[in-house]
Image (tube, rainbow, N blue to C red):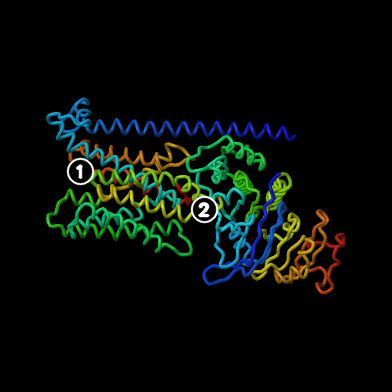
Amino acid sequence: MSIEHSLRIENLTLGYGDRTVIENLDLQVPPGQVTAIVGANACGKSTLLRSMSRLLAPRAGRVILDGKSVHRMPAKQLARTLGLLPQSPVAPEGITVADLVGRGRNPHQGILSRWSPADDLAVADALEATATVSLADRSVDELSGGQRQRVWIAMALAQQTDLLLLDEPTTFLDVSHQIEVLDLLTDLNRTRGTTIVMVLHDLNLAARYADHLVALAAGQVYARGTPAEVLTEEGVRAVFGLDSHVIIDPTSGKPLMLPIGRHHMQNDPQKGVRTGSVGKIVLVP
Amino acid sequence: MKLERAVGVVTTAQTIRNSRTRRALRRRSVVGLLVGIIVVGFIVTLMVGQTFYPPADVIGVIFGQDVPGATFTVGRLRLPRASLAILAGLCFGLGGVTFQTMLRNPLASPDIIGISSGASAAAAFAIVTLSLGDTAVTVLAITAGLAVSLLVYVLSFKGGVAGTRLILIGIGIAAMLDSITAYSLTQAAEWDLQNAMRWLTGSLNGTSWNQALPVFIALIVLAPVLVGQSRNLAMTQLGDDTASALGVRVERSRLIVIVTAVGLIAFATAAAGPIAFVAFLSGPIASRIVGPGGSLLVPSALVGALLVLVADFCGQYAFGTRFPVGVVTGVLGAPYLIYLIIRTNRAGSSL
């Protein structure tokens, strides 16, 4: 359905002030897939995402979309191909859902061009896809956290970009809403072929929902590949400095990480729990 | 299933379209109504006063005919005054709502955060102490307005600009600048209360075309630029990152918006003084009349014009004594300011 775009990062170095956050990073975003970026706090995940959508100019290196540097592209042209949902967007007081979603049409509108039927269709389509039609006339202030996040995603959908970047789309949501949002993003990827790149905090959800997992550590790509390749016990130790067990998630068949802390361990961590034998694992009561 | 969905989307699109058309209609009628009231108010202001002139005389004077008596009273006294009332009101309304929208806080209007005070202090200083001419005064007022907005911004910058900090610093700076104005006035050779009132609260007394013309030119040049940025301004309400992701060049747009808005405020202030609370009141009033969604720039400009026109008329004739326009708008604005501070204290809010 959508044209495949190539998004590539070459030798990227990013920083704020005199602090370097990302150094010489190379990354290729697989088109038409869901990519999740994981890593410890302050490892540069969000910084990387911001630079990919040109919110942050690189110190060195380039972010290349279809052969052109995103930092040199006209703002609106880029915004028609690549969308970004920041971590905590602000809704103006009193704005209605339909209005907010309509703001996503900005890159498709010229200075003088009026609102077109195509804009209405795009907004309606975004509302339908996120199951927010019934909320269209409500004020965004009155919505629950999960509803609000769906509305923001609807706004990004109305932008009709083939690439969508999301910075922690599940933060502040309870577990059922987290799943709801991630299922929605998977639907988009599967039905429209939208390439999705998201920063996620929760390793296990990242492993479940991503086709391609990128682990960042110390401003570098530590590992990338399928979740099974990336989410390993030594990987978790290297990236997060945490001992863990990685087993196979009985629900999805993807890897599932069980952290080992200092307390509440049924078996001696040294002996370990047999990986893969789900039936024998009793989670801490 | 696919067909069902397509039908659903089309139906929803229709609903969205209808509700948008309805709002656009409401907006257009509000704007039309405001323009109508302003035109009527303008003509009434020209007719009514110490001497009453019938509409025919007034219209005659406007079109340049020589009408005994009316040519002087209407043409030289009332017409420039009413024109400046409207022009200054438009400028204050536009500049005010721009800052309120940009900083997402109704308290962040240029007359609260010191920009008008800066322009006013500079104008008073230039006239009284430096004895400068009209053009130099205006230039100085604009420079001071820009300098104050930069100063407030820099002082309140601490890893990003938080609305409340900016407003408090702005209020402090406004108080300092007002004392500069007051000091300049005490140094005036001929201590003239009318003049003093102009720079302290704003006044239209003794307006001539020399004062109205620069404001008119500023409005013609700057207002279209500002209105052209209205969609970008609306986008930046979503936060800089979101706006930028939606294709807005945030920094550039913000610079254009600040310079044009400060320019409008400064030109109007150089001509009529910092007419109290007009910039502050116009946006919220317009927002309540027009309803949510859509740009507030044009409705606020019209509300501003109407406020100044009506307040000046009331100030001249409604009470025993003649009050300068700023005293009347001040009486209207102060209670709203208090209400707003109380409300903002309870819940952080914008327009």
**First-in-chain label (2 vs 1):** 1
* Occupied quadrant, residue A98: top right
Residue closest to the eye, B196 or A160: A160
Q: Residue B208 in the image: x percent, y percent?
A: 19, 43
Q: Is residue B39 above or below residue B263?
A: above
Q: Amino acid at mark 1?
A: Thr
Q: Residue B185 in the image: x percent, y percent?
A: 19, 57
Q: Residue A245 in the image: x percent, y percent?
A: 79, 67
Q: Is residue A278 above or below residue B311?
A: below
Q: Amino acid at mark 2?
A: Gly
Quadrant including the N terminus of chain A: top right
Q: Residue at x 63, y 48 (%)?
A: A161
Residue B239 - label: 2
Q: Residue B38 in the image: x percent, y percent?
A: 31, 34
Protein chain holding label 1: B
Residue B341 - label: none
Residue denoted by label 1: B207
Q: Is residue B16 above or below residue B88?
A: above
Element marked by disc 1: loop
Residue closest to the eye, B320 or A250: A250
- Tell me, yes or no, if residue B278 can be seen here: no
Protein chain holding label 2: B
